[in-house]
Image (cartoon, rainbow, N blue to C red):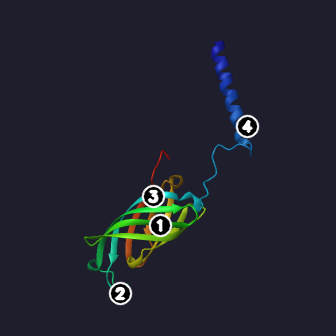
Amino acid sequence: MKTNLKRAAMVLLVIAGLAALTGSKAFKLHANPQVCTTAILHGGYGAGTTGLINTSGDPNDIRIKTFVPFAEAVYFLFDGHGNLSGSSTADFGGSAFPVTFTGTYAVNGNCTGSLTVDAGASGIVHRDLVIVDAGKEVEFVSTDSGVVIAGYMKKQRVDGE
């Protein structure tokens, strides 16, 4: 019986201590939401992209037959300071070809962002980003007119990272 009273007293003491601590502004049970910066994206990322590209010269022509399938395997290299480069193998309507690119990116405090890529003859590409899992993954969607493309990136682990 004394053992049960001691246990009950200990539990009440722990609960009272936690209540006192959680009421204090110096102690928080929940961390503040993460604030993102360009530094969250650094190093290599592998990406998969799929979608459709409108081949009509008229941007208002959105008939199904004007859209051609697109898929791409991409390697992105982010420098942590707003610059990126990379390479990919793109498949546009069944024809595969290599692409190299450079570009810039911006990250907002709420872990959203954007990137702009200059892919030479393949054109300028714009994408909006959502950074998740502390920068280990990035979801993206194209913001270019006539392009319906989405994908994801995953941080590459190199040398035990």
**Residue picked out by circle 3:** 45
Question: For this rendering, which residue is in front, 70 or 61?
Answer: 70
Q: How many labels does the image show?
A: 4
Q: Residue at x 64, y 51 (%)?
A: 32
Question: For this rendering, which residue is in front, 28 or 73?
Answer: 73
Q: What element carries label 4?
A: helix
Q: What element carries label 1?
A: strand
Instruction: State the CA–CA distance, disc 3 to disc 2.
Output: 34 Å
Q: Where is residue 146 in the image (x, y as percent from the top left)?
A: 38, 78
Amino acid type assigned to the residue bearing label 2 in the image: Asp
Residue 25 placement, left or right of 51: right
Q: Which of disc 2 and disc 1 is earlier in sequence?
A: 2
The label number, if any, that marks residue 150 in the structure image: none
**Residue picked out by circle 2:** 58
Which of label 1 and label 3 is nearer to you? 1
Q: What element carries label 2?
A: loop
Q: Which of disc 3 and disc 1 is earlier in sequence?
A: 3
Q: Which of disc 3 and disc 4 is earlier in sequence?
A: 4
Which residue reaches farthest bottom?
A: 58
Amino acid type assigned to the residue bearing label 4 in the image: Ala
